[in-house]
Amino acid sequence: MKRDAKKPENLPANMIPIDGYILSVDGKLKSRYETSNEAVVAGSKLKENFPVIQVAVFDAAAQTYTPVNLQEK
């Protein structure tokens, strides 16, 4: 891990985000990312380790979810 890498920001349980991209795990909003690509990469890593969970990226500005699927090897 890079020393200058910033840990993703965790969201309070009662907050509805208005900007950024939030990783949703099993329907619960977990961590916020600045770009969609960062959120998809984090979601893909989770799906590799835990293929049963449901992972999606929530676009707070558009109020839409994009599912993250396990990549075929």
Image (spheres, rainbow, N blue to C red):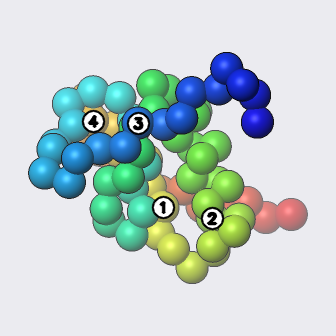
What number is the disc on residue 69? none
Q: Nearer the viewer, mark 3 or mark 1?
A: 3
Mark 3: which amino acid?
Glu
Q: If you read the primary sequence from the N terminus, does the residue marked by circle 4 or circle 1 appear first?
A: 1
Task: Tell me the quadrant of the picture where the N terminus can be found.
Answer: top right
Residue in the foreground of this view, choosing between 29 and 60: 29
Q: Position of residue 10 (x, y in %)?
A: 37, 43
> Which secondary structure lies at badge 3?
strand
> Which secondary structure lies at badge 4?
loop
Q: Position of residue 12 (x, y in %)?
A: 23, 47
Q: If you read the primary sequence from the N terminus, does the residue marked by circle 4 or circle 2 appear first?
A: 2
Mark 4: which amino acid?
Ala
- Find out whether the residues at labels 4 and 3 contact each other: C-beta distance under 8 Å: no
Q: Position of residue 48 (x, y in %)?
A: 71, 65
- Which residue is denoted by mark 2 in the rendering? 47
Q: Nearer the viewer, mark 2 or mark 3?
A: 3
Task: Tell me the quadrant of the picture where the C terminus can be found.
Answer: bottom right
Taking 10 as reference, is 12 left or right?
left
- Find out whether the residues at labels 2 and 1 contact each other: C-beta distance under 8 Å: yes
Q: Residue furthest right?
A: 73
Report how far apart the C-alphas of labels 4 and 1 lie in the structure. 16 Å
Report how far apart the C-alphas of labels 4 and 2 lie in the structure. 21 Å
Report how far apart the C-alphas of labels 2 and 1 lie in the structure. 7 Å
> Which secondary structure lies at badge 2?
helix
- Which residue is denoted by mark 4 in the rendering? 60
- Which residue is denoted by mark 3 in the rendering? 9
Residue plotted at (20% across, 30% down): 18
What number is the disc on residue 55? 1
Residue plotted at (49% across, 26% down): 35
- Find out whether the residues at labels 4 and 2 contact each other: C-beta distance under 8 Å: no
